[in-house]
Image (cartoon, rainbow, N blue to C red):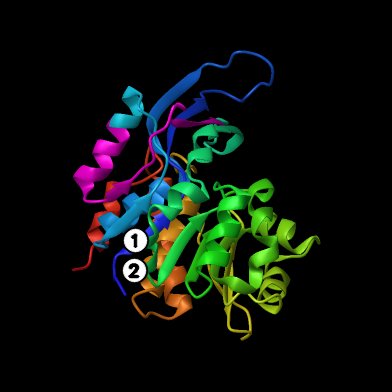
């Protein structure tokens, strides 16, 4: 099997707006707006490449100027980008941060993800067959998820949950997932019950997921594997951070990088937490500082 990592998911242009003073609803707030390349799986692709991994990335990017610039940036980094032709605009994500740099609201326009359908993936079957692991985000369509699990049942699937409303697409495939990383709200949606992190990890393991990582903002990260007892990685408070967008993606990137290099899941979660801390200090959804952890 190819040692290159195969990622399938979304790419966006991120618009991050941060209020200068206490955020007031339904009025125009004075603040700063930054524009950067983003999208959960695109962020993960960039992070994994900066860490020294070879990455094949199946995504949907428009023919507009922003999309072309984003695709060129990935190619320059060394990512092998595979995209269908599309008439949709490149996906976009708008986050509204309060004066503490915490996200209050977000809106994602990812209509273009419709082009990541089973017809297009069928044209990439040789690439899919060459990989042992397939890394997915919950942006992709339910029909695409169904196609992948039924057509390639023996692959090891790694899932990034994205959001409670999106991760529910994977509810019927939990016993086919090798590793899932989600936050407490996404895990509760999958379980259908309001549990705390430790019990959510146990519940997802009981439903057949092989490895589970559940985060909760600045709280400790809980994880479990192969029905073993649930453990945690302590998370220290970060003061004077700049931005929370992309921190969960950095956590996922670190977990994937370490875990697929044969490290224990606890080491992988701890590494992901360190990458998340770096991303907190970045104005965008990724940090070039991650390259200091690059391996050969």
Circles 2 and 1, Cβ within 8 Å, touching? The answer is yes
Please identify the residue farthest to the right as the structure is shown. 193
Secondary element under disc 1, as helix, strand or loop, is helix
Q: Residue drawn 30% across and 58% down?
A: 55
Q: Is residue 219 visible?
A: no
Between 75 and 194, the one lying in front of the other is: 75
Q: Residues within 10 Å of mark 1 (few under 14, many from 20)?
A: some
**Pointer 2 residue:** 130
Question: Measured along the vertical axis of the image, is residue 162 above or below residue 192?
Answer: above
Res. 272 image quadrant: bottom left
Height in image: 205 above or below 162? Answer: below
Q: In the image, 131: left or right of 243?
A: left
Residue 238 locus on image (x, y percent): 47, 52
Q: Residue furthest bottom?
A: 228
Residue 76 is at least partly visible in this image: yes
For the magenta stretch, what is the residue range?
69-96
Residue at the (52%, 16%) spot, across then down: 30
Residue 127: numbered disc: 1
Which quarter of the figure has residue 12? top left
């Amino acid at each position: 099997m190819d040692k290159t990592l195969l990622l399938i998911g979304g790419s966006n242009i991120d618009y991050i707006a941060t209020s200068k003073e206490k955020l007031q609803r339904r009025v125009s707030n004075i603040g700063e707006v930054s524009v950067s390349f983003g999208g959960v799986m695109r962020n993960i692709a960039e992070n994994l490449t900066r860490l020294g991994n070879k990455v094949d990335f199946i995504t949907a990017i428009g023919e507009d100027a922003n999309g072309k610039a984003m695709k060129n940036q990935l190619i320059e980094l060394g990512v092998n980008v595979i995209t269908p032709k599309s008439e949709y605009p490149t996906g976009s994500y708008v986050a509204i941060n309060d004066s503490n740099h915490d996200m209050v609201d977000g809106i994602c326009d990812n209509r273009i993800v419709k082009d990541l359908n089973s017809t297009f993936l069928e044209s990439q079957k040789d690439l899919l067959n060459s990989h042992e692991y397939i890394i997915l985000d919950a942006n992709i369509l339910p029909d695409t998820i169904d196609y992948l699990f039924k057509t390639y049942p023996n692959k090891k699937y790694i899932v990034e949950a994205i959001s409670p409303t999106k991760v529910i697409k994977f509810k019927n495939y939990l016993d086919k997932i090798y590793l899932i990383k989600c936050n407490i709200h996404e895990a509760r949606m999958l379980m259908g019950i309001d549990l705390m992190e430790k019990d959510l990890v146990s519940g997802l393991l009981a439903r057949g997921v092989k490895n589970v990582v559940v985060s909760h903002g600045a709280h400790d990260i809980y994880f479990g594997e192969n029905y073993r007892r649930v453990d945690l990685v302590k998370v220290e408070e970060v003061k004077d951070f700049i931005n929370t967008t992309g921190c969960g993606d950095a956590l996922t990137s670190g977990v994937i990088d370490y875990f697929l290099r044969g490290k224990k899941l606890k080491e992988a979660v701890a590494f992901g937490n360190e990458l998340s801390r770096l991303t907190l200090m970045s104005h965008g959804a990724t940090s070039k500082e991650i390259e200091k952890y690059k391996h050969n």
